[in-house]
Image (spheres, grey):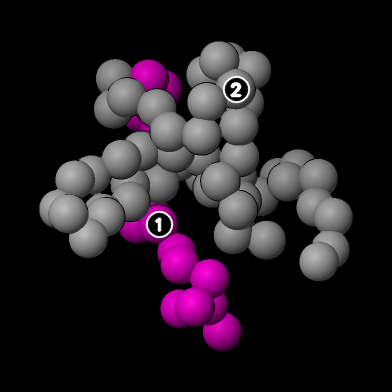
Amino acid sequence: MQDCDHAGHRVYARRLFANKTTHFCVQCLKCLRVVKLPEHGNRPFIRADEVPTGRKIHDFIETKDAQ
């Protein structure tokens, strides 16, 4: 597996789980991993109100769905 610095490739994403719960995170568009950031307490998932105002929230891209 490649190492990725996630620089310049991070977006806020909305992830819908099989149990119908929605979670928010920061996802790297290069490697598709969830990125833990210090400004969010290094947590993989964050509350909706932690997404900065004005930032677009993308749909989470599953690794199996990537081309």
Q: Which residue is depicted at the point 14% across and 53% down?
A: 20
Q: Is residue 49 visible?
A: yes
User: For residue 7, which quarter of the picture?
Assistant: top right
User: For residue 50, which quarter of the picture?
Assistant: top left
Residue 30 position, x and y percent, is 68, 61
Task: State whether the magenta stretch is mostly helix, strand or loop.
Answer: loop
Instruction: Compare residues 21 and 56 and report the one nearer the observer.
Output: 21
Q: Quadrant of the C terminus?
A: bottom right
Whether the magenta-drawn stretch holds residue 54 is answered as yes
What crowding class fits label 2: few (fewer than 14 Cα within 10 Å), some (14-19), or many (20 or more)?
few
User: Looking at the picture, which amino acid does disc 2 mark?
Assistant: Asn
* Label 2: which secondary element: loop
Q: Which residues are magenta?
A: 50-67
**Most extreme residue toward the bottom, as rendered?**
67
Disc assigned to residue 60: 1
Name the residue beneath numbered marker 2. Answer: 42
**Most extreme residue toward the left, as rendered?**
20
Q: Which residue is depicted at the point 60% across and 22% down?
A: 42
Whether the magenta-drawn stretch holds residue 56 is answered as yes
User: Looking at the picture, which amino acid does disc 1 mark?
Assistant: Phe
Count of numbered marks: 2
